[in-house]
Image: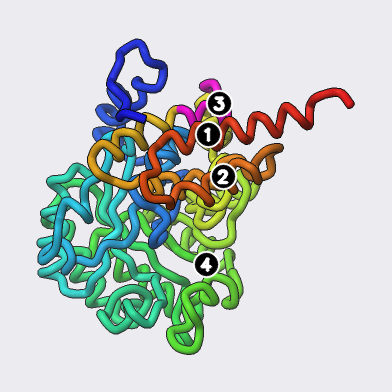
Amino acid sequence: MPPHAANPNHPFDTVLMSNPLSTQLPHQPLDRRLSVAPMMDWTTRDYRFLARLITRHTLLYTEMVVAQAILHGDRDRFLDFNDEEHPVALQLGGSDPQQLAQATRIAGDYGYDEINLNVGCPSDRVQQGKIGAILMAEPELVARCVEAMQAEVTVPVTVKTRIGIDDQDDYDFLYRFVDRMEASGCTSLTIHARKAILSGLSPKENRDIPPLIYQRAYAIKHAFPHIEIILNGGVKTLNEVHEHMGEVDGVMIGREAYQNPYFLAEADRVVFGDDHAIPSRQTIAEQFLPYVERRYALGHAPKHSLRHILNLFQGQPGARRFRRHLSENMHKPGTTPQVLMDALSRSEEHTSELQSPA
């Protein structure tokens, strides 16, 4: 299938050619009532484009990018994003204030709406680079990093953290950390309401085994009313988002937003009060096609984009056929974006069979 040619009359081209969000939202204060968490290998630019077709207002985060990778690697590879993704935030990893400042200045030129510092990842690999949750033990260093980053950009510099690490997991420990963040000028803090166990647990186990203590984040919000507190951890429904909003300023969704992306379709209405028509799953898949074609024309294999759409029809008739067809065919040599339309056809055929009278 040849790359899709831009056509002003094509219903899907409006997504690629003219998105009012890309020109309006970056100049407005960020609304963090709902956001999608930074997740390695998941919240790529391809996923974020798909998510933006589902929700107009939810704040999207990149995967964590290590500051040194920006300074010494392929900057475009790590920092390029689609203009349609706004509002979009970059998460940086690092612990050297000067390196983080330089990376922040470079990233600022790419037009991100927020720069976030990772102080929550517990993996052994990032600990070795003195990145992530291990930094909770050094609030003074984190504060210097934040201050150095703030000096380089006009957009907000925020921090994502845990409620504690290892045996440093009481309220006073978290209070002291947040107090230092407030003194550094940080005005928005995302708190994953689990502590991180820095040895003996995998990153996956650290997302499940330490108990969630939402009340700890609630208490921090009450103690620091002038700091925006975003709650992260274990939230899977918009009803839960609504429940937490009485205690904190916003909620960040992680795995559910990837494993069941269409649940975000109601977010604009339920969370942000925007009653625009909600696109169907079919429409979203069709709107995603020109994007996949555009990436394909630039030399990107369709599998890299299409893996993010596998769960779009979760729980719907025909979902298994859709997923199976993509999974079995998108990795084959010579695959083109047409594989997405073929998968949709298989799904529609199955749905029609189910709806046909006996």
- Residue ID at (10%, 69%): 98
Instruction: Quote the CA–CA distance across marks 1 and 4.
Output: 42 Å
Q: Which residue is mark 2?
A: 325
Q: Amino acid at mark 4?
A: Ala
- Residue ID at (52%, 26%): 283
Are circles 2 and 1 on residues that touch, CB within 8 Å?
Answer: yes
Give the vertical position of 64 relative to 249 (above or below): below
- Residue ID at (50%, 56%): 254
Give the vertical position of 237 relative to 97 (above or below): above
Q: Which tag, 1 or 4, sits closer to the chain's start?
A: 4
Q: Which residue is mark 1?
A: 342
Q: Which residue is mark 4?
A: 193
Left or right of 107 on screen, residue 199: right
Q: Which residue is mark 3?
A: 278
Nearer to us in this view, 148 or 335: 335
Q: Amino acid at mark 2?
A: His
